[in-house]
Amino acid sequence: MRGAVAVLVLLFCLSGTWAQQESGEVRENDTTETTQPDNWAELRALRDMMVEPRVEFHKNTVEELKRENVSQAAELSTMGEGLNARKGKVEELKRENAKLWTRLARVEAKNQDQDAELFKLEARLSSIEQEVDELKRENTDRPKVAFSAALGRPVGPFNTVVTLVYNNVITNIGNAYSPVTGAFTAPVRGVYYIRFTGMDNRISKRVGVSMKKNGKYHIMWAGQKNLADYQYVSNAVILELEERDVINMELDAGFRLYDDHDKHSIFSVFLLFPM
């Protein structure tokens, strides 16, 4: 390109020089016939030789640019379609994501409800455990009193009232019953359940038993006349006893009780609850 420009400049300068020489010669000799070649025609030919290739080059360049532009436009169109497809996919993913967030919110709400219910259950369980521990402590601290004893032999009849001694001890938790004296002594103040059973196997004979508190207070009596073999009498009572109160069973004068290894005549007491 720079070479072509230099040639044009040179030709322009030469054309100017030739024009001056031609103009001078004409003035010196107006009648002399011009014998110089037509320099302007040569310059125009040279100019055309330089310009036409450049025009052709520009045309080719323009065509090439047009083809590149068309190709780029096609690529942009393809990219635009791909972009639109991606946008559609993104929108679909957004919708799916919104659905997932909704489901997650529901699950979290459900979990919160379950956590609240679990908290209530744990609080209730803790309360129950405390109550159980309290009951265990009460049960541990609570005195344990229970006994049962049988006569183990026939007793009576006697001419006077006698205290019955049940010396065949079956159970004696707390050692509140004495198999020597036949007396039950309350170890603590509380409510007690007291029961006895008496039997006689003599026909037409009287059988009966009475209960005394502290040796003088009559609590109850049970008895009857036998009409057949193995006639039983029994009774029970719930008493509020103070600590050291004594309960014993007595056989009235003329009465008889029968017992053997089968334990027909029994005296039993157990503590319901202390007070």
Image (cartoon, helix red, strand yellow):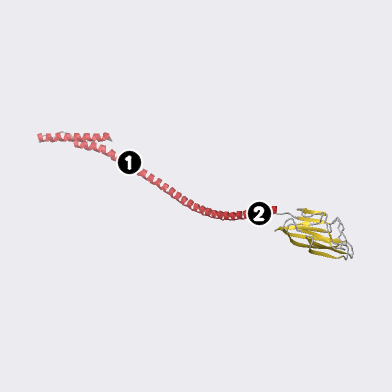
Q: Residue at x 69, y 53 (%)?
A: 141
Q: Residue 6: in sight, yes or no?
A: yes
C-beta proximity under 8 Å, tags 1 and 2: no
- Residue 123 in the image: state x and y as whole percent: 60, 54
User: Circle 2 — which element?
Assistant: helix
- Which of the two residues, 99 or 63, is positioned nearer the viewer here? 99
Rendered-image quadrant of the N terminus: top left
Which amino acid type is marked by label 2?
Answer: Glu
Which residue position is annotated with label 1?
61
Q: Is residue 45 above or below residue 243?
A: above
Q: Residues within 10 Å of mark 1 (few under 14, many from 20)?
A: few
Farthest residue, direction right? 203
Percent position of residue 194, x then y: 77, 60
Q: Which residue is mark 2?
A: 134
Residue 56, horizontal then vertical, whole percent: 30, 40
Near-viewer residue (159 or 93): 159
Label 1 vs 2, first from the N-terminus = 1
| Left or right: residue 56 compared with residue 147 | left
Q: Secondary structure at mark 1?
A: helix
User: Where in the figure is residue 39, as x and y percent of width and height?
Assistant: 19, 35
Amino acid under disc 1: Thr
Name the residue rendered at 76%, 62% in the picture: 237
Q: How many marks?
A: 2
